[in-house]
Amino acid sequence: MIHVVVGISGASGAVIGLRIVEILESLGAETHLVVSRAAERTLAEEVGPRAFSRLRASARHWHGVDDIGASIASGSFPTGGMIVAPCSMRTLAAIAHCLADNLLVRAADVHLKERRKLVLVARETPLHLGHLRAMTAATEAGAIVMPPAPAFYLKPASIDDVVHQIARRAIDLLHVFEPVAAQWHGALEHTEADDVIEALVSTTDQAIRMERGQ
Ligand SMILES: Cc1cc2nc3c(=O)[nH]c(=O)nc-3n(C[C@H](O)[C@H](O)[C@H](O)COP(=O)(O)O)c2cc1C
């Protein structure tokens, strides 16, 4: 049984963390979930008022963010890796600078010190130099920084497609399960998704022209 830690912090994209937990559970992982207080807010704002309790129930193990004595706070507890999704700039900076003052950051710090996989789905835009420096420091310490950028070349037809692909890519970066993300094998065939994207682009173009009075 593989233990995987999932940290959800208060950046936009809480649904990505939610999907990661669901997919890991479907893969048979022993998921350990830790959610920051800000993420309780983003889950409520972005997903819905009951999202946090649903998420808590769907993970095999839930740990309070202040429980710095939880199993995942120790390097002696074996795991197959940790994903922080989404990863706020505050949590990113705390991880990059070893400020392990809550369980989420402590568990990430443990993954770095034990030289295990740590994937940070870092979300902010635009980025200032402090954000970029924190990403560099986290990368130098051994983390993988994976911004939640859509793979447009896979022609996603919905936001759910985008979210699923990002969630699956983050899981694949752990290299503990068979790959689950969609893969590029050269040019794709024309699909219904192409029609949806073309319609969206032409509607957006029209809206811009109207806005400009053209
Ligand atoms: C709706 C909402 C969206 C937010 N989006 C982001 C974001 O994309 N990136 C980020 O770094 N912070 C974002 N924040 C701010 C963080 O939640 C805030 O900095 C918080 O202190 C992060 O704490 P944590 O790292 O312990 O979760 C957002 C806050 C709210 C309420």
Image (cartoon, grey):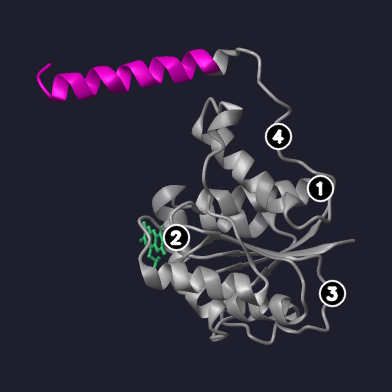
Q: Few, some or many C-alpha atoms within 10 Å of disc 3 (few <14, some 14-19, many ≥20)?
A: some
Q: Amino acid at mark 3?
A: Pro
Q: Could you give the CA–CA distance between mark 4 and mark 1, rounded to whole angstroms? A: 16 Å
Q: Report whether residue 64 is seen.
A: no
> Please, is residue 179 above or below residue 141 in the view?
above
Q: Could you give the CA–CA distance between mark 2 and mark 1, rounded to whole angstroms? A: 26 Å
Q: Earlier in the sequence, mark 1 or mark 3?
A: 1
> Closer to the camera, 74 or 178?
178
Q: Amino acid at mark 4?
A: Ala
Q: Which residue is mark 1?
A: 27
Q: Which residues are magenta?
A: 194-214
Task: Please give the name of the residue rendered at 31% of the width and 18% of the height, measured from the top-left corner.
Answer: 203
Disc tally is 4
x, y percent for residue 149: 51, 45
Q: Which residue is mark 2?
A: 11
Residue 204 inside the magenta-drawn segment: yes
Tell me: 44 left or right of 122: left
Q: Secondary structure at mark 4?
A: loop
Q: Which residue is mark 4?
A: 182
Q: Could you give the CA–CA distance between mark 3 and mark 2, rounded to whole angstroms? A: 28 Å
Task: Check whether the beta carbons of the residues at disc 3 and disc 4 lie within 8 A of each other.
Answer: no
